[in-house]
Amino acid sequence: MRVTIDDITVDVEEGTTILTAARKIGGKIVPPAMCWYSKLKGSGGKCRTCLVKVAQSSAKDPRPMPKLVASCSTPVQDGMVVQNITSPEVLEARKAIVEFLLINHPLDCPVCDQAGECDLQDLSFLHGMVETRSEEPRREFPAIDIGDKIKLNMNRCILCYRCVFTADQITGKRVHGVLYRGDAPEISTYIQNVIDNDFSGNVIDVCPVGALTDRTFRFKSRVWFLNAMDAHRDCTHCGGKVTAWMYGNEIYRITGRKDKYGEVEEFICNECRFEKKNFSDWIIEGPRKISRESVISANHYEKLIKPSIIHPIEGTTEKQE
């Protein structure tokens, strides 16, 4: 299948979605996604932030699709022409979607542990409005502990369902989900059950906002003060490949390694995440590559080696400054 996205053409396999095709191209033309997760079956189609305009359905049917479509769940057709950042209609719709996502979201970024690595922060910075038009009171929920390691702040939740799919697909028993309907739905456990299984901590990694946070790390440090290091250990439950967030030789928290789209490469067990916090527990591989656009890169000490501007003399090796 050949598809053109923002005037860039790419060949993909049949059944590939528009969002996956855009990620194959990369760069700024990739639509944002708050609910879709490539490793979770059934995810996507809930937040609507990945809406795009299909200007040409296919080579056989050059008519445009009448409405904007969710790129995470729309398969490409041969000859399809898609507009993302080149469409004013898409940008205006995305602006409205961000406004809806922030209707009930509190302005507590200064005290939220997700600040600095929050997808909703990035999305609101790029597409959000300067002022809100909402005058209604925001929904309020008390913060609760759903287990001895996980804190739930339902005020921040955008109902992306990622944590529900994660618990459903990588654990043997799911005890939490979406309760109630209409304007009163919430992520919670029925009759105050606790989430207690070997991989329950992964719901923290997949959450795009600060609704689910690590109780062992809360309020200990900001992520931009720490150095993200690739580390591994021999583990009988998972692959043991993690990101260790360190200050000097002290490990503040352990998370799964994430790719450039913020998705976990391999889910890790609770033993690695919560119990192994000593420097001697891990083999430190080196600094994790962090995007220069992230605030986490402010304290990243990986040095860049710039080539010398002096051309080497023939027969000698090039010097570097």
Image (tube, rainbow, N blue to C red):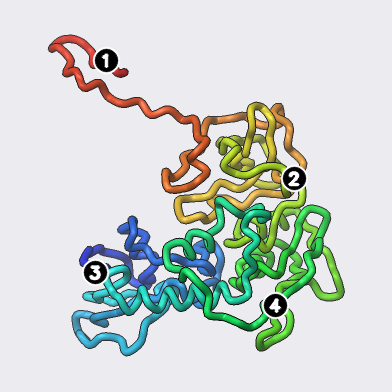
Q: Earlier in the sequence, mark 3 or mark 4?
A: 3
Which label lies toward us, 3 or 1? 1
Q: Of the numbered discs in the image, which one, if any, rests on residue 19?
A: none
Q: Are marks 3 and 1 in contact (CB under 8 Å)?
A: no
Q: What is the total number of numbered labels drawn onto the structure image? A: 4
Q: Earlier in the sequence, mark 1 or mark 4?
A: 4
Q: Earlier in the sequence, mark 1 or mark 2?
A: 2
**Residue at mark 4:** 139
Disc 2 on helix, strand or loop? Answer: helix
Q: Earlier in the sequence, mark 3 or mark 2?
A: 3
Instruction: Say above or below: 215 vs 42.
Output: above
Q: Of the numbered discs in the image, which one, if any, rests on residue 319?
A: 1
Left or right: residue 202 versus residue 67 is right
Instruction: Say above or below: 310 vs 205.
Output: above
Disc 1 on helix, strand or loop? Answer: loop
Give residue 26's position: percent from left, percent from top.
34, 56
Q: Of the numbered discs in the image, which one, if any, rests on residue 4?
A: 3
Q: Could you classify mark 2 by the number of other residues whose Cα lies within 10 Å: few (under 14), some (14-19), or many (20 or more)?
A: some
In this view of the protein, can residue 187 be seen by the observer? yes
Name the residue at 77% across, 41% down: 275
User: Which amino acid does the dot numbered 2 rest on?
Assistant: Phe
